[in-house]
Image (cartoon, rainbow, N blue to C red):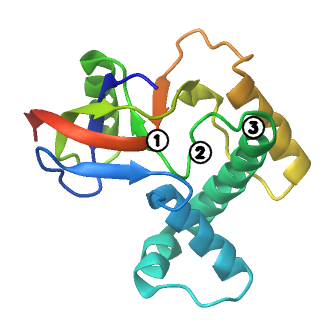
Amino acid sequence: MKTEYVYHVVTERPMELGQKLIFDQQHHNGVYHRVTAFKALLCGEPVEEKLVRLLQPDMDKWSKVAYREMALEKIRKEYFPTYPSRMACLYTSRTLQEAQSWAKFFQDIGRDVYSIVRLKAGGGFFDGDACNCFDGVPNEEENLEKAWHYWKKDCSNEKPVIETLIDGEITVEEIIISF
């Protein structure tokens, strides 16, 4: 795979210049950990306390996210296995302008934003339209139909909001903007 450069809005914890990240079948992101914690809670299984504290204030929101992400992963694995998993990837932007728009959006909804970084990545890439994400529901069939449209990219929106999913080995090449 060829090396590409993308931008990432850093929101969960600061990143450092030269930092290396890996996302693959053994290395997952925060979405994965929150979805698996939600599934465990539903089954009455033990869940790490810090994840319970994260989920409990808004279980309705996390149920919608979990049902959506489980459907998206099922469709991806079956029909689009070469695309990065949304639960084992970094969400990025192809341009600095797109990253700045995401940073503003995150700030407007009250999410901490630490910086925008430029990354060097050589894994898989998928440009999806975040407008095709959906609130998941307990009805798996309904979720799977919507998930198909996300990966197939057959629902065009007047003003798409592009999210570039990347996996593999990723290196922080430059800290562009610090907040």
**Marks 3 and 1 close (CB-CB < 8 Å):** no
Q: Earlier in the sequence, mark 2 or mark 1?
A: 2
Can you identify the residue that label 3 sits on? 147
Can you identify the residue that label 1 sits on? 167
**Marks 2 and 1 close (CB-CB < 8 Å):** yes
Residue at horizontal 62 percent and vertical 14 percent from the top: 157
Between the residue at mark 3 and the residue at mark 1, the CA separation in whole angstroms equals 20 Å
Q: How far across and how far down the image is residue 36, in percent?
A: 61, 69
81 or 87: nearer the viewer: 81
**Residue 62 picture quarter:** bottom right
Left or right, 48 with respect to 154, comes to left
Q: What's the amino acid at mark 3? A: Ala
Q: Which of marks 3 and 1 is nearer the N terminus?
A: 3
Between the residue at mark 2 and the residue at mark 1, the CA separation in whole angstroms equals 8 Å
Q: How far across and how far down the image is residue 37, in percent?
A: 58, 74
Residue at horizontal 51 percent and vertical 67 percent from the top: 33
Residue at horizontal 81 percent and vertical 42 percent from the top: 78
Q: What's the amino acid at mark 1? A: Asp
Q: What's the amino acid at mark 2? A: Ser
Mark 1 Cα within 10 Å, few/some/many (few <14, many 20+)? many
Can you identify the residue that label 2 sits on? 85
Helix, strand or loop for disc 1: loop
Which quadrant is the C terminus positioned in? top left
Residue at horizontal 25 percent and vertical 20 percent from the top: 96
Relative to 122, residue 89 above or below: below
Residue lying farthest to the top in this orientation: 158
Helix, strand or loop for disc 3: helix
Q: Earlier in the sequence, mark 2 or mark 3?
A: 2
Labelled disc at residue 158: none
